[in-house]
Image (tube, helix red, strand yellow):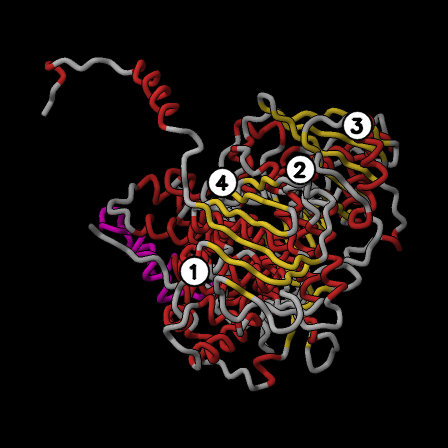
Amino acid sequence: MRTSSEIETVSKRASRAAGFSWGVSEEIGKCIKSLELYQISGLENLNDYLKKIKNIRPKGPLEIEHKNSLKEGNFCPIYTGVALMDASSRIMKLKTLSIQSVDFPILLIPFLNKISYKIGKMIEVKFDDIEILLNLNNYISSNTDLRQKILKYTKQLSINVIENRDTFDASVWDSLYELSTETFVEESDSYHHY
Amino acid sequence: MFNVDHRDPKKIMTLSRLGSFHQSKLSFLRSFIREFKNWKFKRNLFDLNDGGYGLVVYSVNKNERTYSLICFANELKSDERSDRVIATKWDAAFVLHDGVPTKSDLDRLRQNVPKQEVGRVSYKELTLSRANKSVRIFDHVVQRLAKGMQPDIKLINDVGYLYRTTAVYGSGKFGLADRYRIKDRPEICGPFRLEMMLVYLVRQFTFDQVNHIAKCKNPQEAVELSHDIARNLGIGNSTGLGMAPFIVNHPTLLHNWIFSREEALKQIRQIENVSLKDFEFFKSCLNRSKKNINSWITESTYQNKKIEQLKQDLEKLENDLFSKLDTKQRHLWNTIYNWVELNLSDEGVEYIVSMMMEPYDSIIEPLVAKMSSEEDQYFDIPGEKKVSELLSIVENHYSKFLDINFDTKKSVTNFWFISKNKEEPRIANRYEEGGSDLEQPLAIARDIAKLHKKLKSSNQSNTVAKFLLLNQDVRHVVRRCFIVENFPYSEIQDNTIDENLVPIDMLRLKLSFFGAQKFDPRSDKWLRISMYQGAPLIHELNSSNDTWMYNLI
C-alpha cells in the first residue's frame, strides 16, 4: 500500500515534470492525496491526464463567469480547479456556474470540495449522469460509485452552491425541541439575580 | 508592565544565526525523555549469536499503548561498511513498530528492514533507520570488556558513541504510517518524538550488543560496560543535505520551533525578580556544560573557529559580567541578555539563550506542546486579497531579498535538486553541473524578488486570484507570503542559492532542535553529531533529571 505522503509527493513531482509550476504542482499533490483518501481514483486519473497533455499546453479560465467556455480545446481540470479555488468568494457570489468541455472532471472534485469548506456551503456538482454533493471538505456523496472511475472528458459540468437549509420540517423540530425542554428546571423568583 | 519584544525575525532567521543554535530544554531528545520517563521499557527478545548478529526486540509500554523497536544486526565485511547514501548494507537496521509485533510481522520485517529504502514496510511501522559501528571504539570496548576491563575513557570521550545512524525515516516514507494516523496520540505530540524514541532504544541496543559479544568471547572474565561509561555514550549520526530543504519545505513548523524559543526568551527576560536558586542553577548548568564544549572535537576549521569563539565568549561573560550581577537587581535576565547580545558572537549569544531556559520548566513545558504544526491548515492562498496587500507583505517581510541583485552569477550560483540515485535533495553549482532546469523550489529569495517585480507592474486593485491566473509560475512563493504574514519565523532570511551559502548552517538549525551536540562538519555539506550523550540509561529513566546532557564524565 502506498502512503498518503508518497501519493502527494509523487503526484506533485510528476505534475511538475509534466509542465505545471511548482505552486500548482503542490496543489495537485494535496488534491490527489485527498481523492485517494476518499477512495476515488485520483492517481489513475492524474496519470492518464498527464499522458494526455504531454505535447499540448493545458488551458484554464481567464475569468470566472456564470458560463465558461473556450473557443478551442478543453478546460484543464487542474488550472480550472486552481482558478475556481482562488476565486472562492466569486463562486459564492455567482452561486451557479457551468463549464463547457472539461478534461478528466474527477480531478476537479477536490478543488471544489475545498471551495465548499472555504465558503461554508455545500456544493453540488453535475457532469454526465453523475451528481456529487460536496460538504465542507468533510465528505463527498455521489449517485455513482466513483471508485475506479476514470472519466476522460465531460461536455458540460455544472456547479451549484447550495444555500444552507434544514433537512427537516418545522413540526419535526418542534417535537424534538419539546423533548429537549424536559432537561430544563422551572426557575422560581428566588433564583433571579438581576 | 515591563515588556520585551520578540527578537526581530530578520536578525534571528539569518543562516549565520540559525547555524549557531544549540540544544536547549525545548529540544526533542529532552522532551522525549521527560514524556517517556514513566513508561515501562522491556527487552522482549534477545536472539544474537556469539558474534552479536541476529534479532533483538525492545518495547516501551504505558497503559494500553506499546511501541516496539525491532533490531536486525547483520554481519558486514569492513569493505562493505559505508556512511554514504549509496550504501546498501549496514551493521544494523531498525524499525519502530506500533504495538507488539507478531511472528508474521517479524518475518515480514526481516525481509524488508535490512534493505531500508528498497524494502517496504507497512502502516504498522512508524520509523525506520540503520546504523554502522564506529569500528575503532566498538572493537576496543569489546576487547576490554572481554578481558574484564573497562574501556579507555579518553577514547570514549573522543568518539562518543558505539554506532552512528545514517538516516532515520518517518511519516509515510517507504510505507511507514502517515502522520495523520497517529498525530492525536498525546505522548507523541512533540515533533519527531518517534524518531527520538527509535534513537534512544538503538542506544540501548548498542550497549546490550557489546556486552553480549564480550561475554561470548570470554564467559569467565568478561565484565559489563559500567553504567557511568555507558551513560557517557550516545548515538552518532551522519547527516547530509537531505535534511536542509526540510526547513524550507515546512515553514509553519519551522516558525513554531523558532517562535517557541523566542517566546521562552521573551518570558524569561520579562521576569522581574530572579531567585538566587534559579540564577545559581543557570550558573551550575553553564559550568557543567563546559565539559561538552571542551570535549567537542572536530577537524573542521569552520567549526573549530566557532568553538574557540564560544570558549572566549563564556570566559568573557564570567570575567566581565558575572561579578557585576546581583539577583537583587530587577530584570536580571534582561540585563544579561542585552549584555550578551552586545558583547558576544552569535555562537555565544545562542548558547546563553539556551542556558537561560534551564531553570524554567513552567515556561518551557507549555511551549513544547506547541512545536508541531497542522501544516495543511495554512496551505490555501486567500485569493480574494488585493495585489497591493500582497506587495506590502513582500516589502515588509522580505525586504532583505529585494536588495539582492539576482542578475549576478554570485547570487544564483547554486541550485537544489533531487538526486536520481537516492531521491534525496542535493545542491550543485549551476555553472558547472547540468540539471538546473530541474531545480527544486528552494530558491525563495530569488523567487520572491521575481514576484516583487511582477507585483509592482500589476494592477494593485486586482485580486490575488486574478494575478495568479497569469502568474502561476510564482504561486509557490505567493503561498509563502501569506504564511510569513502570520508566522514571521517561517522563512530563512538569506539567499539559499548564493555562492557563499554554507548548507551545514541549515542542518545545524534542525539538529539543534533535535538536541544534537558536538556538531562535527566533515565538509560544508555534511556533518556528524552525537545524540543522547549523557542521557539516563533505561533503568535510570524514572529517576532522571532534565539536565542529563551536562553530566559527561
Q: Which residue is mark 1?
A: A90
Mark linked to residue B547: 4
Residue B207 location, quadrant:
top right
> Which quadrant is the C terminus of chain A positioned in?
top left
Looking at the rendered image, the disc whose residue lies closer to the viewer, 2 or 3, is 3
Q: Position of residue B173 (x, y in %)?
A: 70, 47
Q: Is residue B91 visible?
A: yes
Relative to B113, residue B447 above or below: below
The reply to whether discs 3 and 4 touch (Cβ–Cβ < 8 Å) is no
Q: Do badges 4 and 2 share one subunit?
A: yes
What secondary structure is found at the residue carrying circle 1?
helix
Q: From mark 1 to mark 4, how far is it between C-alphas?
A: 56 Å
Q: From mark 4 to mark 2, how far is it between C-alphas?
A: 17 Å
The three-letter amino acid code for the residue at tag 1 is: Arg
Q: Main secondary structure of the magenta part?
A: helix
Looking at the rendered image, the disc whose residue lies closer to the viewer, 3 or 1, is 1
Looking at the rendered image, the disc whose residue lies closer to the viewer, 3 or 4, is 3
The reply to whether discs 3 and 1 touch (Cβ–Cβ < 8 Å) is no
Q: Position of residue A32 (x, y in %)?
A: 65, 52
Residue B334, magenta (yes or no): yes
Q: Do badges 3 and 4 share one subunit?
A: yes
Q: Is residue B153 visible?
A: no
Q: Position of residue A127 (x, y in %)?
A: 62, 52
Residue B531, magenta (yes or no): no
Q: Answer with left or right where residue B488 lies relative to residue B142.
A: left
The three-letter amino acid code for the residue at tag 4 is: Thr
Residue B4 location, quadrant:
bottom left
Span colored in magenta: B318-346
Q: From mark 3 to mark 1, how far is it between C-alphas?
A: 64 Å
Foreground residue among A41 and B247: A41
- Alpha-carbon neighbours of circle 2 within 10 Å: few (<14), some, or many (≥20)? many
Mark linked to residue B46: 3
